[in-house]
Image: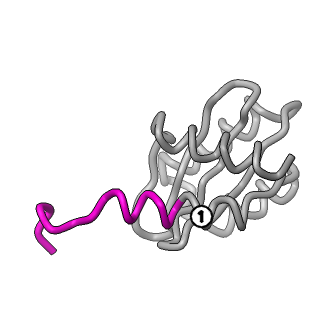
């Protein structure tokens, strides 16, 4: 699909809705299990990034949400940091827009 035909506003709105529906706190044990399921290759540099994120936020509340298009998002509001991944496809640091969507999802749950 050509990039000029992508409706980013529609995608963003769908992601916002699915985050609001799926957001939940996730325990350290659940995070470790998720990391082992997604990053099973011990040489994957993102495995180290994922588990480093867990270690850095072991005393904080971490939220997990899955968007309508399969993006997993992990976010810690205390540090305003997060990561995203689509198993087998891609991963990265949560953007400011992604962090904002997660904050909105958390606030909607309160």
Residue appearing at x 43%, y 57% in the figure: 12
Q: Does the magenta-highlighted stretch encompass residue 36?
A: no
The secondary structure that dominates the magenta segment is helix
Q: How is the image coloured?
A: one colour
Residue found at x 52% / y 71%: 70
Image height of 56 relative to 11, above or below: above
Q: Residue furthest top?
A: 79
Badge 1 marks a residue whose secondary structure is helix
Q: Which residues are magenta?
A: 1-15
Quadrant for residue 16, please give it: bottom right
Label 1 sits on residue: 17
Residue 109 image position (x, y, % from top left): 82, 52
Quarter of the image holding residue 24? bottom right
Residue 2: give x, y in percent of width and height. Answer: 11, 69
Magenta stretch: residue 9 in it?
yes
Is the N terminus in the top left, top right, bottom left or bottom right quadrant? bottom left
Q: Taking 7 as reference, is 91 above or below it?
A: above
Left or right for 80, reference 61: left
For the point 73% across and 40% down, the residue is 54
Q: Nearer the viewer, residue 52 or 74?
A: 74
Residues packed near mark 1 inside 10 Å, few (<14), some (14 to 19) or many (20 plus) = some
Q: Nearer the viewer, residue 11 or 71?
A: 11
The image shows residue 20, relative to residue 87, as above or below, that is above
Residue 89: percent from the left, percent from the top?
40, 67
Q: Residue at x 48, y 34 (%)?
A: 96
Residue toward you, 21 or 24: 21
Front residue of this view, candidates 5 and 95: 5
Residue 36 percent location from the top left of the image: 69, 63
């Amino acid at each position: 699909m050509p990039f000029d035909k992508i409706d980013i506003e529609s995608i963003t709105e769908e992601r916002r809705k699915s985050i609001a529906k799926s957001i939940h706190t996730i325990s350290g044990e659940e995070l470790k299990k998720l990391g082992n399921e997604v990053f099973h290759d011990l040489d994957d540099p993102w495995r180290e990034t994922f588990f480093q994120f867990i270690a850095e936020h072991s005393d904080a509340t971490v939220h997990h949400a899955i968007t309508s298009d399969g993006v997993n998002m992990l976010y810690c509001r205390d540090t305003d940091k997060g990561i995203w991944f689509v198993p087998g496809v891609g991963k990265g640091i949560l953007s400011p827009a992604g962090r904002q969507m997660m904050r909105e999802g958390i606030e909607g749950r309160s």
